Image (cartoon, helix red, strand yellow):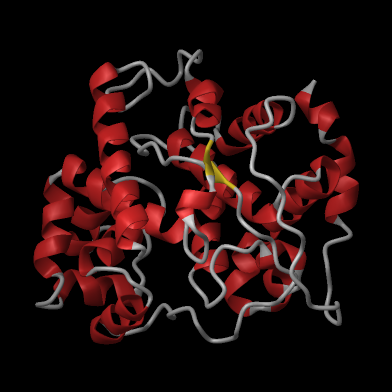
Amino acid sequence: MLGHTFLLSLVAASLMPSGGLAQYDLPRKEPRCDDSVWPGIGEYLREQFTDDHGGCTQLAAQAVRLPFHDCFPDGGCDGSILLTDECTSRAENQQMVPLCRMLYGIHHDSHIGAADLINFAASIANKACPYGPFIPFYVGRRDRQYAAPLNQLPSATTSAKDMLNIFARKGFSPEDLVALTDEMDSPKYYTEVLLGSAPAILPSDKHLALDPATTNIWQLYARSQYAWDQAYINGMLKLILKGNKVHEMLDCSHLVHETFEYDDQYSGPNSYHNPQAWEKCEEAAVVAVAGLLYGRQ
């Protein structure tokens, strides 16, 4: 049983790094799609990320968000949020501690890269959530045991102008910024923010919804699942490849496909069973990766 496979992960999770660790780059492993390890992890994560009603769990929401916290600061996607005390010691990461502990345990037991694991979990979580788009999965990131610089993530009260400037300095467009605000993969959130009916609305999201520089983008995503899908895929690809050279990485997206393709639960209009949905998502991913590869963003 998969739960048995990762039983030791629960023990390893209690040994997450604390302060005072030596800081260094870990050796970069030759990228490969290890079919003896990743499929089992994918199935385990899918079980953790889906609830009994076909929705996604809080762990899934955390997994969608975690690449932003690992990849957005200077240093890019380097796994430092698992390999240092970033997750457990910083206030902005406190909601993700349960996921960090789980992933650290898997990393410890399987010896796969922490940064690659974070982004694999995000790809699985995106697809586990209803209407979540397919996010390609690449391996070959270099892990670093350096804590990311402090104060590089925007706060929940950051103004739209400041958010646009912060994201622009990191290479993200206004379309990327607005698309990445929704961590539960449901464009209805954009409508709910405009109507004030969302269960919880961050002030920063309200700023983006109403600011003249971003309100048209916000309203577009409220109207169009397809427009949001394309923008979200593009923004996520920029994020999950940040700090790494895409032409040195290996595309292991089949591992995401195989985690879901035989499960009848995922048979909706945006699922892997729908050829048009596959084609749209994969086409958007190819275009986005080409831009990253040849634009060197």
Q: Please name the residue shown 86% across and 82% down the image.
A: 20
Instruction: Examine the rendering and report whether any part of residue 182 can be seen.
Output: no
What x and y, as percent, mark residue 116? 62, 49
Instruction: Examine the rendering and report whether any part of residue 230 can be seen.
Output: yes
Q: Please name the residue shown 43% across and 60% down the image.
A: 239
Q: Of 183 and 236, which appears nearest the observer?
A: 236
Mark count? 0
Would you say 1 lies left or right of 142 here? right
Would you say 12 lies left or right of 127 here? right
Quadrant in the rendering for residue 235? bottom left
* Quadrant, the N terminus: top right
Instruction: Give above or below for 84 relative to 152.
Output: above
What x and y, as percent, mark residue 175? 21, 62
What x and y, as percent, mark residue 262? 50, 13
Q: Please name the residue shown 80% across and 40% down the image.
A: 110
* Quadrant, the C terminus: bottom left
What x and y, as percent, mark residue 275? 28, 17
Q: Of 276 and 160, which appears nearest the observer?
A: 276
Q: Please name the residue shown 44% across and 80% down the image.
A: 155
Instruction: Give above or below for 250 relative to 80.
Output: above
Quadrant in the rendering for residue 36? top right
Instruction: Give above or below for 52 relative to 221.
Output: above
